[in-house]
Image (cartoon, rainbow, N blue to C red):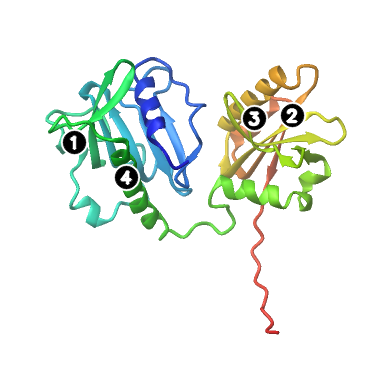
Amino acid sequence: MNIFYPILEKFCLQAQNRDLYTVEYPKTCRDFELRVSFGMGQPARIPWIAFLAPEMKVSRGIYPVYLYYKDLQTLVLAYGISETEEPNQNWPNEITQSTEKIEDFFDQMVARYGDSFIYRAYGVRLENKKVVFFDRETNDTIEQSRIEKDLSGIINDYAKIVSKIAPDPTLFYMEKQLEDFLIENWEKTELSKQYDLIIENGVLLSKQYKTNIGNIDILVTEKKTNCLVVIELKKNQTSDDTVGQITRYMGWLKEHKAKQGVVKGIIIAARYDKRLDYALKMVPNIDVYLYEVDFKLRKFTKQ
């Protein structure tokens, strides 16, 4: 997804109410994982949108992040730093030594994220249920093109930094890579023995199957029973959180596409933790597959 402005508008509007759900937001953007939070259990004082490289977590890492300081009517695009645990990787000195911290930017103490560094700050006001971003000094409206340009700028900075971190060669860099690999090599996988991709009139429907609660990574049918099977992909480690995600899709299919039949689920990941193991004991019809990347070298023979 290249145009981010509509998502940012939706985010700022939703932050005004008590709706904490984020299932309608995309899972990736600009080649990075997208995480959105309005709080857990109750609305957060500072909702956020984070862009995460594969080796980063919100709880431990660095990442571009939108921080919405609602009380101050300000949206900050920042070089974010996790607060929960100290990150292994830091923003380079050319950023930290020349960029203002959030705690120094505002005239008053802020509740959280004061150690992150400001890339841009926008004033926010609501007019007739629409979001208007404006320059805090001049009060001039900020155009959509400026918002998109700013995001591209910080994303480019981030991409250069994380590209220097060597990824685990046994893992896919992004879920999209895993998804593309499975689709393109379906007949060579173990899954093809039991499941079929959904193709209608020569069009592949399985990949990113659309529902009104989000897109299913891969939707297939079981050969023996013809029942629908949701495949949820996790490029790295998965946990019990994944069970909630896949069962939502299974429930949607049960209600809208398979009212008289069984719906099954498959989770594919590189690793999983014990929490997932316990969660699956209470949820029928979900299997787990662990993928392996086999890296080989073959000598090229000149013709």
Q: Counting other residues with Cα less than 10 Å from the Cα at mark 1, is it few (<14), some (14-19), or many (20 or more)?
A: some
- Residue placed under numbered mark 4 in the picture: 149
- Residue placed under numbered mark 2 in the picture: 264
Q: Is residue 229 left or right of residue 1?
A: right
Q: Earlier in the sequence, mark 3 or mark 2?
A: 2
| Residue nearest the observer in this picture, 204 or 182 | 204
Of circles 3 and 2, the one toward us is 2
Q: Earlier in the sequence, mark 4 or mark 2?
A: 4
Q: Amino acid at mark 1?
A: Glu
Q: Position of residue 208 (x, y in %)?
A: 62, 37
Q: Earlier in the sequence, mark 3 or mark 4?
A: 4
Q: Are marks 1 and 3 in contact (CB under 8 Å)?
A: no
Residue 45 visible at all: no
| Real-space Cα separation, disc 1 to disc 2, in angstroms | 49 Å
- Residue placed under numbered mark 3 in the picture: 278
Q: Position of residue 209 (x, y in %)?
A: 65, 33
Q: Is residue 146 left or right of residue 220?
A: left
Q: Are marks 3 and 4 in contact (CB under 8 Å)?
A: no
